[in-house]
Image (cartoon, grey):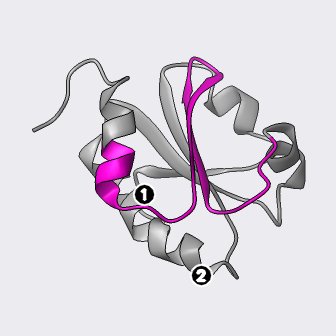
């Protein structure tokens, strides 16, 4: 994981998503599509640094949070705004799909 990404856990999740925009990748190490999405999430963390908090939550190690947000398939990427889910993307997708969803919520879009 890159320096500008957060490792979400059951313990820190509610505190970390309370303010601003937070993009969370619900994943597991054994999940092939998750490994495809991982580098895209890292790019987004870099591209939107200072505007969106980005990180990953390992569903195997943090089942409470995954169940709380009804994550049934992985990868699932949820965008939170001030603690509330505003966008959910399920399955491996190209970076452009994630960016379209992010740009709806980011006040000033990077070009």
Measure the C-alpha gap from mark 2 to mark 1.
Answer: 15 Å
- Image disc number at residue 110: none
Depth check: give the residue in front, 110 or 103: 103
User: Does residue 71 appear in the picture of this structure?
Assistant: yes
Residue 28, position in %: x, y?
A: 70, 70
The answer to whether the residue labelled 2 contacts the one labelled 1, judged by CB atoms less than 8 Å apart, is no
* Label 1: few (<14), some (14–19) or many (≥20) C-alpha neighbours in 10 Å: many
Marked residue nearer the N-terminal end (2 or 1): 2
Q: Secondary structure at mark 2?
A: helix
* Residue 12 belongs to the span the image colors magenta: no
Is 101 displayed left or right of 64 in the figure? Answer: left
Numbered range of the magenta stretch: 70-99
Residue 6, position in %: x, y?
A: 54, 49
Residue 58, position in %: x, y?
A: 71, 62
Q: Which residue is mark 1?
A: 41
Residue occupying the point 67% across, 77% down? 29
**What number of labels is visible?**
2
Depth check: give the residue in front, 90 or 31: 90
Which callout, 2 or 1, points to the residue nearer the camera? 2
Residue occupying the point 37% across, 35% down? 102
Residue occupying the point 70% across, 28% down? 15
Q: Which residue is mark 2?
A: 32
């Amino acid at each position: 994981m890159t320096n500008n990404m957060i490792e979400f856990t059951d313990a820190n999740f509610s505190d970390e998503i309370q303010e601003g925009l937070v993009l969370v990748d619900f994943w597991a190490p054994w999940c092939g599509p998750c490994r495809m999405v991982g580098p895209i999430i890292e790019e987004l963390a870099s591209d939107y640094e200072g505007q969106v908090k980005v990180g990953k939550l390992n569903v195997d190690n943090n089942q409470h949070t995954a169940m709380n947000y009804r994550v049934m398939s992985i990868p699932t990427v949820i965008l939170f705004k001030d603690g509330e889910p505003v966008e959910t993307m399920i399955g491996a997708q190209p970076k452009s799909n994630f960016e379209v969803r992010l740009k709806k919520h980011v006040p000033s879009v990077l070009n």
